[in-house]
Amino acid sequence: MDKRAYDFPGIKELELRIQFVIEFMLKHTDRFDQYETFWPRSEDASEGFPEKILTEFALLLFLGKRVSDKNSELENHLDFAIKKIDPLIRNRKNFEAILRRPSSCTTLGLGHIFLKAAGFGNADWDLLLEQAIGLGFDQLAERQPFRYLDSVWVNGLLGLPVPYNQEDILPFSIFNSINHPAFMTVNDAYVFTHTLMYLTDFGKQNPGNGIQINKVQETINASILWQLSEENFDLLGEFLACHVFLNDAWNEYSGGAWRYLCTVWDRLSFLPGPAFEQEVFKQAGEQEKTAYAFKETYHTNRVGALLCIALLARKKTDAPIPPHKKPESEIYRRIEKYLSELPDNDTEYEANPAFRNKSELIENIRKLIPHNSCKWLPMLIEGPNFENEKIKRLLELNLILSVRKYELKILHESL
């Protein structure tokens, strides 16, 4: 296969996309006072929607600082944005809220932790967070395993001791299950991507020996197919970022998905969010329209920038690509059983009438997702690789969709 067809994008393109998202976020943070009218806050919630967005923005800026060159245009954008949101995060209101409810140190306090990690410290906030976390207030709530990994990662950013090791948590994580997208829920998908974010420090470190890397890589590839079929750019961006975090080779899954994501991004000038509803938008008043549109698109565009940061880090380090092996889990042995029976080259494929052609597989996919544009399909099956490789991807997508839609006839045909 000619790997040049799946080359990473250039450094300048990635930096411009990150800067565009920073400007998008800053434009709307100036309007939070207007937007809050349309973002109701739960009475017992320590963190409202504006605080959540600012925390996630601070994380993006911190990760951007790790890959930006000194005195570059990207660094100038990052520093300007940090100074702009600093007083929105580290203000008296949030400080006193943590004093009243110390367990909010890992919600209202996270923004400070990310700003500090980006090189913008604050001694008063350091002391507040170190005392709250040191006394165990960050451990009051019941948590899923990936949230414990989150806690380990955050403590590491603050230089605080961790109450448990990653290896103790992983046996209970989603990585220790048959986490194939044929069976995963959307929530499972977010748990999967966030688990890998914290394990790898967003691609900065090896995930360790506690996971089957090959199995995780296969799940990511299959999940890219799944999210393309859903046209969910939020999870598509997260799975593509996870692909980069593992330093996996840019391949026919990730390369085609990146091209489609950028096609939509460039055509619309933003990435649409998965929960955006056209009818809700139409019925809203003018000011509410803007608040609603930002609420439903900010996260997906932030994910797009996070993906660009991961690609930028990979581009600059030029890390060697690890060898790829077949996964060992039972679910993948079953899936590979029919995929491995495909012929090895175009000549054998053309000579073997038992294998269905692309048009039939594509027609099945269109039947399974009738409301989807399927504009991404050509990018999934184009490229220099052999015909049987394209058939493998289509067969795998047929399997995922037929299981998820409970279309037994198509499922049996796929197998």
Image (spheres, rainbow, N blue to C red):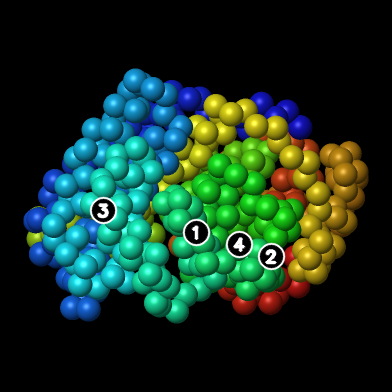
Q: Secondary structure at mark 2?
A: helix
Residue at 35% from the left image edge and 27% from the top image edge: 74
The residue where tag 4 is placed is: 166
Q: Nearer the viewer, mark 2 or mark 3?
A: 3
Q: Amino acid at mark 2?
A: Leu
- Tell me if residue 223 comes above or below residue 260 in the rendering: below
Q: Earlier in the sequence, mark 1 or mark 2?
A: 1
Q: Secondary structure at mark 4?
A: helix
Q: Quadrant of residue 170?
A: bottom right
The residue where tag 1 is placed is: 161
Specify few, some or many for label 2: CA neighbours under 10 Å numbering under 14, 14-19, or 20 or more: many
- Tell me if residue 346 comes above or below residue 14 in the rendering: below
State the separation of the CA atoms marked 2 and 4: 33 Å
Q: Are marks 1 and 3 in contact (CB under 8 Å)?
A: no
Q: Nearer the viewer, mark 1 or mark 2?
A: 1
Residue at 75% from the left image edge and 72% from the top image edge: 412
Q: Quadrant of residue 209?
A: bottom right
Viewer-closest of 84 and 326: 84
Q: Secondary structure at mark 3?
A: helix
Q: Residue 27: where, in percent of width, then height?
A: 18, 41
17 to the left or right of 285? right
The residue where tag 3 is placed is: 125
Residue at 26% from the left image edge and 39% from the top image edge: 82
348 to the left or right of 364? right
State the separation of the CA atoms marked 2 and 3: 51 Å
Q: Earlier in the sequence, mark 4 or mark 3?
A: 3
The residue where tag 2 is placed is: 399
Q: Secondary structure at mark 1?
A: loop
Viewer-closest of 191 and 290: 191
